[in-house]
Image (cartoon, helix red, strand yellow):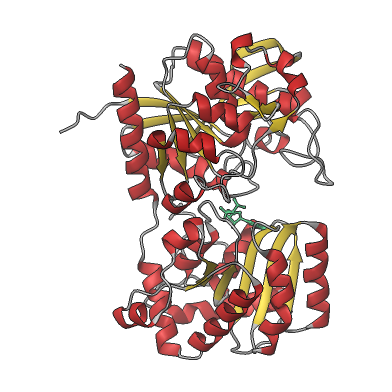
Amino acid sequence: MGKIVAMQVLSVASEIYPLIKTGGLADVAGALPGALAEHGIGVRTLVPGYPSVLSKLGKTKAVRRYEALFGASAALLAAKVVELDLLVLDAPDFFKREGGPYGDLGGTDWSDNWRRFAALSRVGADIAEDGVKGWRPDLVHAHDWQAAMTAAYMRFGPAHRVPKVVTIHNLAFQGRFGADVFAGLGLPPEAWGMDGVEYYGGIGYLKAGLVSADAITTVSPTYADEIRSPTQGMGLDGLINGRADRLHGILNGIDTAIWDPAADELIARRYTSRALGGRVANRRALEKHFRLDRDDAPIFIIVSRLTWQKGMDLVADAIDHLVGLGGKLAVLGAGDHPLEGAFLSAAERHRGRVGAHIGYDEPLSHLMQAGGDAILIPSRFEPCGLTQLYGLRYGCVPVVARVGGLADTVIDANEAAVGAGVATGVVFAPSDPLALHGGIARTIRLHGDKAGWQAMQRAGMRADFSWRHSAAQYAGLFRSLVQGAA
Ligand code: ADP
């Protein structure tokens, strides 16, 4: 039997729920620490001090100060929010801005993102080197390109022996910058080059992290396979294949305390899988919010970034088909402006059948999962995807493309699966108009069989996508790395 090692981990992330969130990364960064605690692993998370983060901190203590962190004055604040143990990088020159974590209000990336996230990563490596007030991590876990340089700074510095894990939440975002920024990074000359930060003549932050990490994880087993292929590897498949022995696909879990239809305070009426009738009040509230007709036609929902990755252009083009078959659609999302416009104009065109809410609204996303019949996710690629997991838990049947984590988590309602009572959703492939039309039509047919539909809802609600299994996998990996380094 392996000995349980009490371990300290520094997690470095550019988002963390409930302080700052633009996507699934925040949910994971916010939930994994609690799940790892069950395994004797203590996590402190280093996050940027955006205004929305600083405003939610209670009592803080400065545990380190920088007079010139990439030219800016900064303080590292220790704080506790809910159960999260945070180290917040308060660097106003970098993070005190109106807009999102990565760009301005218009959605344009900040031009100094290379410096902002190099600074975050530099501080991560400093903590690995020196600790803070006697606390020292046994392992560093960096999320996505914004934090990946932590592994590079560690590798080329005194903390090179501390195990470093880089998790890919989305390979499409790589943090690529011009070669000219190298001089400003404060890395030694040997860090330049194929085996370092250099990437197609420029600099790649995620790439630098991936070559420097002792282990690479990504957020579902299927995505771990997909990113080894040229079509899905986004230029990094060669590198990832070369490090395949260090690559692990660990499915994201969901925070079952925050996403629990039996206890959710953000929905109109709470319910369980045994009493699905409680969903009706949520359905009515949803119809009211989106000004949809009050009837029993199946309501498809979308809670998503409105982007090409998510296949939202396919949905926009399929709306007439969906409505023609008798379905209704409620869209909550923000993203590409032409897509936002397409959904708004569809809502005009199909009053009572289609509703669109452009923006980001966490409470509304809960109500939609509780009141909608099916959540539509025709992603072209999907590292894990969380909204299908929330859908499963809330009895909002996922209708998904067979890619990445969607393929790993939804069981298609084919004859065999329905017969065995294990079907949890509708899975179609590929992500194209024809297959999406077929998936929508099949969903509407299935919805017509009330008993069959409820069986599918219940099977989904019973499935366990909590962090339990996944945290055990992270814990096992972390332990093996720490023991290997000892
Ligand atoms: P990604 O991280 O690629 O955007 P995920 O499915 O992994 O996709 O995670 C998306 C997260 O963001 C989910 O928690 C989802 O509920 C939430 N979300 C996405 N868009 C919105 C929105 N417009 N309003 C509220 N929550 C949203």
Q: Residue furthest left?
A: 1
Q: Is residue 481 above or below residue 314?
A: above
Where does the image place residue 324, in percent across and percent down from the top left? 69, 89
User: Is 160 in front, or is 371?
Assistant: 160
Q: Is residue 94 above or below residue 469?
A: above
Expressed as whole percent of the image width and height from the top left, the position of residue 170 reads 58, 45
Horizontally, residue 267 falls left or right of residue 422, namely right
Q: Quadrant of the N terminus?
A: top left
Q: Is residue 131 visible?
A: no
Q: Residue at x 37, y 73 (%)?
A: 459
Residue 432, image x, y percentages: 63, 70
Q: Which residue is at 77% across, 39% downward? A: 103
Q: Is residue 64 in view?
A: yes
* Quarter of the view holding residue 440: bottom right
In this rendering, the count of numbered labels is 0
Q: Position of residue 18 (x, y in %)?
A: 58, 44
Q: Quadrant of ligand 1?
A: bottom right
The image quarter containing residue 285 is: bottom right
Q: Is residue 353 left or right of residue 232?
A: right
Q: Is residue 413 above or below residue 129?
A: below
Front residue of this view, candidates 263 and 476: 476
Nearest the eye: 421 or 86: 421
Classify residue 337 by image quadrant: bottom right
Q: Quadrant of the C terminus?
A: top left
Give me the residue at 49% from left, 12% from top: 129
Q: What residue is drawn where x is 45% and y is 89%?
A: 450
